[in-house]
Structures are given as C-alpha cells and as structure tokens.
Image (cartoon, rainbow, N blue to C red):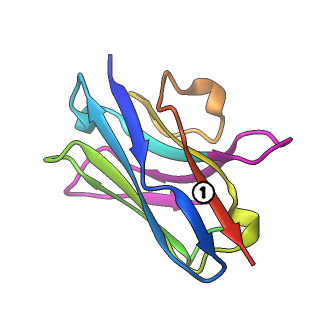
C-alpha cells in the first residue's frame, strides 16, 4: 500500500509557473511508476506525464499538450515526485492527480491502483 498526497496547486496567470509535489508514504516510491493525470470539468481524466521507477536511469514521458513546458522529476530519497509546470495556459486548468502502479506506465487511469486526492490548478488570462 502507498498513500499519495499532492500539493502546490493554485491560481496563476497565463505564462506563470507552478511546481506540484506528490509525496508518498507507506511504501518506497522506487517500487512504483508515478504518473500525473489531470481532469478538467466535464472531461475525462487525461495523462500528463510519467517518470520511470529508477533514479539512475530515468525515462520521462509527456503528453503532447505539455511537452516542452512541463517537467516531471522524482526524488526517491524524499519519496516525492514533482511536476514543474512552466508557461501555463488557461487550458491547463484542471485538478491534477498523481497515481502509482507497480508495473509499466500506462495512459489509462483505470490501471492505476493508488491515487492522491488531487490539487486544483487554475490559470487565468
């Protein structure tokens, strides 16, 4: 079992930056692949970014909509995964969730066993 807690959301203007954190407890994060999803009102939860389990050989994957603007990193020593979001746009407005699973990453939120409660990101013009 692993518990995930997101933080760092807020209300910002277009072009601003935010850094989200996903802190884990219960089990070491190195056993899981960690993924960020987001969900805007009236839409399905969508994949944002994923980072592989290992700190020494890191693989990062991004949705096309955030590539070049967002960066996912993990610090296994702190049991925390971060999502640095730069040049935010109004269409980035959503609740952001981190999720974990012990296998390989998947774009489908249905395959993730563990979820945080979410943190709201609102980007105004």
Instruction: Find out whether residue 43 is within the magenta segment.
Output: yes
Instruction: Find out whether residue 90 is within the magenta segment.
Output: no
Residue at 66% in and 79% down: 14
Disc 1: which residue: 121
Q: Position of residue 42 (x, y in %)?
A: 86, 41
SS at mark 1?
A: strand
Name, please, the residue furthest toward the right.
42
Left or right relative to 33: residue 78: left
Left or right relative to 31: residue 88: right
**Which residues make up the magenta segment?**
38-63
Name, please, the residue furthest toward the front.
11
Q: Quadrant of the C terminus?
A: bottom right
Report if residue 64 is visible in the image. no
To which quarter of the image does residue 124 belong?
A: bottom right
Q: Position of residue 83 (x, y in %)?
A: 44, 60
Q: Position of residue 121 (x, y in %)?
A: 60, 57
Left or right relative to 82: residue 69: right
Q: Quadrant of the N terminus?
A: top left
Relative to residue 118, is residue 91 depicted above or below?
A: below
């Amino acid at each position: 079992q692993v518990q995930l807690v997101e933080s760092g959301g807020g209300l910002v203007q277009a072009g601003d930056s935010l850094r989200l954190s996903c802190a884990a407890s219960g089990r070491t994060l190195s056993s899981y692949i960690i993924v960020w999803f987001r969900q805007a009102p009236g839409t399905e939860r969508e994949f944002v970014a994923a980072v592989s389990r290992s700190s020494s050989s890191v693989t990062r994957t991004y949705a096309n909509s955030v590539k070049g603007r967002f960066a996912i990193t993990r610090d296994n020593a702190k049991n925390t995964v971060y999502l640095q979001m730069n040049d935010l746009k109004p269409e980035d407005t959503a609740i952001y969730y981190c999720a974990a699973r012990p296998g390989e990453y998947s774009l489908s939120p249905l395959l993730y066993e563990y979820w945080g409660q979410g943190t709201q990101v609102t980007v105004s013009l």
